[in-house]
Amino acid sequence: MGLLEGKVAAITGGAAGIGGGVSRRFAAEGATVVLNDNNEEWLSAAVADIEAAGGRVVVAPGDIRKPEVVERFAAIALGVAGGRIDVLVNNVGDFRPPGRFLRTDEARWTAMYEINLLHVLRCTRALAPAMVAAGSGSIVNVSTVEAQRGIPANAVYSAFNAGVEAFTRSLAVELGREGVRVNAIAPDLADTPQTPAVAMLAGRDPSAFRHWVPLGRAGAPQDYADVVLFLASDLSRFVTGTVIPVDGGTLAASGWYLRDDGRWTNMPAIP
């Protein structure tokens, strides 16, 4: 018996990257995965992987920023088991295109809002009532460590993800008596199609990761998926309103870097 055996789990942006790791992990643990994504190639690959491993998957394609896609996603998810939904993972988010705040405009703010916060509110509003009706459920949101520290050239992205975290904590308090838990993860340095390790390294040797990540490497999709699984399953049955950094220790280290001589410094490198 898997940790999610017999459960129905809906995942936004679940075909690749962190979401792809979550969907594959959930299916391996026995869940029927309702998979949303707007990339047909990634969707096909995820479905093939899940089915080849003996898992169950239902697709709900489309751009989750659109209200009609959220409505269809919720309808498909609720149709799997007669109106029951056990897990919702609000995974979609993006920091691109970055830019200094004073060079941005309202169109860019709106775009950041739609992809980082608004769809979280919409999907949760669409599916949480079924959890309340059943007296159980787990909602897992995906934020970023940049919601908890200053980040240059991404102030709006940081602000909306701080909203995701505040929403997570407040909704957890609001829905706890109904048996619904709400938590989040805050990733950093995820080696995914959106943020490939090679781009993060920018020409440097991969050993450079040891200088700014206490665990010495970038994160793989399964690193994040395992923590989401913990929050989605009964392993975390007494955990709600929590944001777990999944970052290799970068938030804890914040501003401290490992030198070649083994000592730590908070002074920036001088070219």
Image (cartoon, helix red, strand yellow):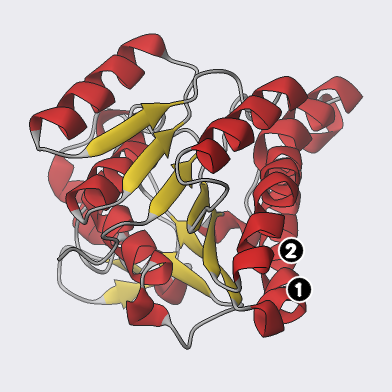
Residue holding disc 1: 170
The amino acid on which the numbered mark 1 sits, given as a three-letter code, is Ser
Residue 74 shows in this picture: yes
Q: Nearer the viewer, residue 108 or 104?
A: 108
Q: Secondary structure at mark 1?
A: helix
Quadrant (top left/top right/bottom left/bottom right) for the N terminus: bottom left
Q: The C terminus appears in which quarter of the rendering?
A: top left
Give 162 or 154, whichever is nearer the viewer: 162
Give the percent coordinates (x, y) of residue 81: 46, 46
Q: Quadrant of residue 144?
A: bottom right
Q: Is residue 177 toward the left or the right of residue 225 in the image? A: right
Residue at the image position 16 percent from the left and 30 percent from the top: 51
* Distance from Cα at disc 1 to Cα at disc 2: 5 Å
Q: Residue furthest bottom?
A: 238
Name the outermost residue toward the right: 106
Q: Residues within 10 Å of mark 2 (few under 14, many from 20)?
A: many
> For the view shown, which residue lies furthest in the left direction?
53
Q: In the drawing, does residue 152 fall left or right of residue 204?
A: right
Please, what secondary structure does the residue beneath circle 2 have? helix
Toward which corner of the image does residue 132 lie, by quadrant?
bottom right
Residues marked 1 and 2 touching at CB (< 8 Å): yes
| Front residue (pair 238, 71) | 71
Identified at 41% across, 69% down, the residue is: 231
- Residue 121 image position (x, y, % from top left): 75, 48
The amino acid type of the residue labelled 2 equals: Phe
Quadrant in which residue 58 is drawn: top left
Q: Is residue 99 above or below residue 153?
A: above
Q: Is residue 93 above or below residue 261?
A: above
Q: Horizontally, is 189 left or right of 209 in the view?
A: right
For the image, the number of numbered tags is 2
* Residue at 43% in and 15% down: 39
Q: Which mark is residue 167?
A: 2
